[in-house]
């Protein structure tokens, strides 16, 4: 018996930032098991001194996967199997659809990665998606649904999707999405929402995501209209209009050294405008959320901040605010928190995926010309599309790059295969790997480990204090230990989702899951 290769040992940290003196957290990154143990037991496990652990604790930790009788090769087999099962049952059947009515935008933000498109010229930039292309996209989407694939959502994207000149094509997209039962969202600068307000309400948009950079002039310095107009006040007025229609709004604030002082100002401005008033929610307002995120820029930039820097700035902006509340407003930490909270309901097995982001998990961004891309950073780059919409046949046609993106997962990337964070990181961001290594199909660790450790330590402490249950999540270790060689081989080779599901059901994978 030995300590699992995929074991992570963390402190339990409460809302005030104080570490527990008596208890610690064990996380098994392979089986998704989160367990609270005594600090002494954690010390012994860290020292690989398992023989001195009490027999009852040894038994529990063996059943949960923290301790194992398997060698490293056998554990790696479990990594490959879990990655395959997740891909077959969850990732591959999933499409996250983004539709771009145009590449054009009415803003000219200096830091926007999409500014490179200006080189194509006015005619190319201002082209709107043709109605025939919209029809073909959703004919293809319907075919995918008939094949058993789940289209999670359709997000209007750009450029800027809500331009007055594109009203007709936006309505066409909404009509066809609604006919197929696909929920609608939009990523917008928020400036011309008022022209689309009735349409947004009619088609029951779930969420509008809008970027702001600060309050008033601090925002307007960067996020100006292409004709030089200030934009902040009009955006805020439009946010109110959308919320009053019952539409959810998420404001994302890009932060670096230049505007870090705006964190407190924005929180105060949102509160003053009543965005977070519970009384407004009772009157039918949509859900309002906001989050801060570090600007994507070179580490050598004098304005560069890490996600950790941004979180510290959020905490400093509101002295006395507990750390859990603070991390809910830092985008990367909040994302980690949501996944952890979901796993700790114990209503489902931990969602372990070897893919880092939606680019590997079914994302399809379709531009006005019908080209399909996996990631916004690759839009309009020659040779980077993963396919196109066959307008005549009404189907999605994918090329070899689609298969390469689908295969960019931690279980394939050699350095990730023995990493305890493999299913929490998924190999890291492909585009950051490209920037750092010149190849998106390399791994990229970045600061994911630090973000995840910080969040897991605090969320786990909070859940344990609330529930008093030391087994915070379910674990894959038990069901996998019951698997016969024949069942393992079947799961390793079959492409039938029905057969996979039936085998897992027989093994008790879903026992006790609500």
Image (spheres, grey):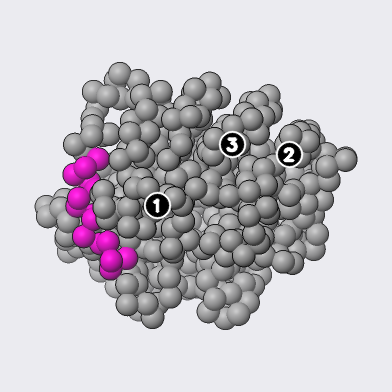
Q: Visible in this render: residue 345?
A: no
Magenta run includes residue 262: yes
Considering every residue shown, the one lying at the far left of the view is 320
Q: Visible in this render: residue 370?
A: yes
Instruction: Give the CA distance from mark 3 to mark 2.
Output: 13 Å
- Which mark identifies residue 228? 1
Residue interval drawn in magenta: 256-270
- Which mark identifies residue 388? none
Residue to which mark 2 is pinned: 130
Give the quarter of the image for residue 306: bottom left
Closer mark to the observer between disc 1 and disc 2: 1
Instruction: Give the CA distance from mark 1 to mark 2.
Output: 30 Å
Give the quarter of the image for residue 380: bottom right
- Which mark identifies residue 165? 3
Give 370 or 285, whichever is nearer the viewer: 370
**Is 472 situated left or right of 132 in this image?**
left
Give the quarter of the image for residue 163: top right
């Amino acid at each position: 018996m030995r300590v699992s290769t995929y074991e992570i040992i963390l402190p339990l940290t409460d809302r005030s930032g104080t570490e527990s003196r008596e208890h610690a957290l064990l996380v098994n990154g392979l089986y998704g098991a989160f367990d609270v143990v005594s600090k002494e037991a954690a010390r012994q496990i860290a020292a690989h001194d398992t023989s001195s652990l009490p027999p009852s604790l040894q038994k529990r930790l063996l059943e949960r996967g923290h301790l194992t009788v398997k060698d490293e090769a056998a554990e790696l087999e479990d990594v490959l199997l879990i990655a395959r099962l997740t891909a077959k049952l969850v990732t591959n059947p999933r499409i996250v659809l983004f539709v771009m009515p145009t590449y054009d935008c009415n803003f000219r933000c200096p830091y926007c990665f999409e500014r490179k498109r200006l080189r194509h010229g006015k005619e190319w930039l201002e082209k709107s998606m043709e109605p025939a292309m919209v029809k073909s996209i959703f004919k293809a989407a319907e075919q995918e649904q008939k094949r058993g694939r789940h289209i999670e959502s359709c997000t209007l994207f750009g450029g800027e999707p809500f331009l007055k000149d594109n009203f007709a094509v936006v309505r066409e997209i909404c009509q066809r999405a609604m006919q197929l039962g696909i929920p609608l969202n939009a990523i917008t600068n928020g400036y011309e929402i008022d022209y689309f307000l009735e349409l947004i309400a009619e088609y029951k948009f779930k969420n509008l995501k809008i970027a702001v950079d600060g309050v008033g002039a601090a925002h307007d310095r960067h996020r100006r209209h292409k004709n030089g107009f200030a934009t902040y006040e009009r955006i805020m007025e439009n946010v109110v209009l959308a919320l009053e229609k019952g539409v959810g709004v998420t404001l994302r604030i890009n932060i670096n050294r230049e505007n870090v002082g705006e964190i407190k100002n924005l929180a105060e401005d949102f509160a003053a405008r009543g965005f977070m008033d519970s009384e407004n929610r009772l009157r039918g307002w949509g859900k309002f959320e906001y989050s801060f995120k570090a600007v994507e820029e070179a580490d050598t930039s004098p304005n560069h901040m890490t996600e950790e820097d941004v979180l510290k700035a959020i905490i400093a902006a509101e002295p006395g605010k507990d750390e859990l509340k603070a991390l809910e407003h830092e985008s990367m930490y909040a994302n980690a928190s949501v996944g952890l909270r979901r796993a700790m309901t114990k209503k489902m097995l931990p969602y372990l995926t070897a893919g880092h982001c939606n680019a590997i998990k079914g994302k399809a961004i379709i531009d006005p010309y019908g080209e399909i891309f996996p990631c916004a950073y690759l839009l309009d780059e020659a040779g980077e599309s993963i396919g196109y919409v066959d307008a005549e046949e009404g189907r999605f046609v994918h090329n070899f790059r689609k298969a390469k993106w689908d295969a960019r997962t931690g279980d394939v990337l050699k350095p990730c295969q023995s990493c305890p964070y493999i299913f929490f990181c998924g190999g890291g961001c492909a585009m950051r790997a490209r920037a750092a290594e010149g190849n998106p199909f390399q791994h990229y660790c970045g600061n994911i480990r630090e973000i995840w450790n910080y969040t897991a330590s605090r969320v786990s402490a909070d859940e344990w204090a609330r529930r008093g249950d030391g087994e915070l999540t379910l674990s894959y270790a038990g069901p996998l230990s019951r698997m016969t060689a024949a069942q393992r081989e079947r799961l390793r080779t079959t492409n039938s989702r029905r057969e996979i599901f039936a085998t897992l059901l027989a093994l008790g994978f879903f026992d006790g899951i609500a």
